[in-house]
Image (spheres, grey):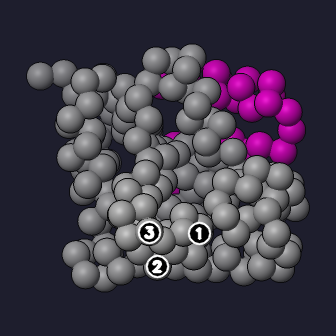
Amino acid sequence: MKKKKIIGIIGEQAGGKGSVTNNIVKKYKGFRLTTSDLLKKTLDNLHLEFNRDNLTKWAIALKDSFGQDILMRAMLEDIEKVNADFIVIDGIRMKGDDKPFRDKYGKKFKLIYVTADPKIRYERSKKRGEKTDESKQSYQNFLKKEKTATEKYIKTLGKKADFEITNNSSEKELEKQVDEIMSKI
């Protein structure tokens, strides 16, 4: 049986993880799985607002109750259900999140760290308003969120990444960096 190729995407809020993932999925015919989608299903069922605070609380509660690798184990199960050889995982963010993928897929797993200047990320976050609490938050609150349990290990884990993208420029420059990485994968 041929092992699937897995690319994990890690990065700070509004750094461009979604753009990198979308670029890879569209141009390289990958399939996207996100931890946010896993968490959102339950939040929706409980009629709770889809915001960063609720996502964080739910992720922590699951990890505390069912083990620190619960979300990544769920992703591994979802990967096996996908009929594709190439899958992008968006949502690796906490200490040890990469380990289950490295253990199962070995060299077929690559981790890409997507980062950008905090002020650029803050402006993107406000503009996109992806989660209900983003568009009105202060810069101080934005930075404070990066110290929460689901965010504080991102830079440390990013140092273990196979590749790094600095997304401080244009969409075209971002695509160029993605293409360079994909040529190596």
Pick the front one: 86 or 142:
142
| Residue 34 visible in the current orientation | yes
Relative to 27, say whether 53 is above or below.
Answer: below
Task: Classify mark 3: helix, strand or loop.
Answer: loop
Relative to 62, say whether 80 is above or below.
Answer: above
Q: How much space separates mark 3 and mark 2, taking CA atoms? A: 15 Å
Report x, y in % for residue 20.
62, 35
Give the residue type at disc 1: Arg
| Residue 52 numbered tag | 1
Q: Disc 3 marks which residue?
A: 47
Image quadrant where residue 11 sits: bottom right
Pick the front one: 26 or 182:
26
The residue positioned 80% from the left and 24% from the top of the image is 172
Q: Disc 2 marks which residue?
A: 57
Report x, y in % for residue 78.
26, 43
Q: Earlier in the sequence, mark 3 or mark 2?
A: 3
| Residue 146 numbered tag | none
Magenta residues, start to end: 160-185
- In front: mark 3 or mark 1? 3
Q: Are marks 3 and 2 in contact (CB under 8 Å)?
A: no
